Image (tube, rainbow, N blue to C red):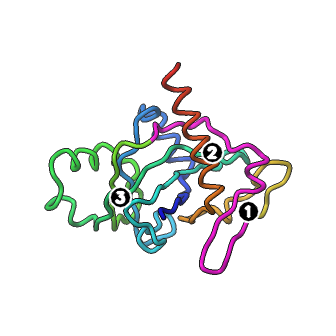
Amino acid sequence: MANSYTTLWTNDLCRELQRDGYEGERLSVLFGGPHQSLPSFRTAGVQPGDRIHPIRLFRRKLYVLGALDVARLMPYEDTGSLLDDDDYAKVMRWRPLKAGCVGEVVFGPPGAPLSFGTAIPGDLLERLTYTSRRGERTLRNVVDGELLHHIGVHGIYRLAPESARALDRLVRAAADFTVAA
């Protein structure tokens, strides 16, 4: 069974993507690395078939920004020699996501459109659950439907199945709204 993960994007990155007109584009590439500022998808256990939800914490609200289904995960240093022109163009197009030391690239078919306005409702935030080998955990620092600190979401974490389905519903609703608008 495929897993779903979240990865936290910085507010600076989100502002840059908004400013440069990426909102509404479908995610097709993500980058990972060896440092906390750009964590490794491979180390987190991400495999082809899994789904990744970029998230953002802004003014105590947690936003789900889109989704990407993982088709391929490869070392960044191999992108120039192993990719066809279309995939290499995707790497170049999503260059702003390459913050810090890049060690790997995640490819997928065009995913959900990038949207910065889909806040996770407070009741869902309070029950949002992550899972690991040690068990399940909910977020700490949630008060009155707001997340007071990024601890607990900073990195790449696997969602529990019901939480993954809930984020998928939010992303799908935002994509339907974008198409209808």
Q: Residues within 10 Å of mark 2 (few under 14, many from 20)?
A: many
The label on residue 106 is 3
**In terms of sequence position, does the residue under pointer 3 or pointer 2 come before the other?**
2
- Give, as a three-letter code, the residue at label 2: Tyr
- Count of marks placed on residues: 3
- Give, as a three-letter code, the residue at label 3: Val
Viewer-side residue, 179 vs 144: 179
Residue sitting at the far right: 144
Residue sitting at the far top: 181
Location of residue 133 in the rendering, given as x and y in whole percent from the top left corner:
60, 79
Residue that carries the numbered disc 2 in the rendered image: 63
Assess whether residue 57 is covered by the magenta stretch. no
| Picture residue at 31% right of the left edge, 60% below the top | 72
Residue that carries the numbered disc 1 in the rendered image: 139
- Give, as a three-letter code, the residue at label 1: Leu
The secondary structure type at the circle numbered 1 is loop
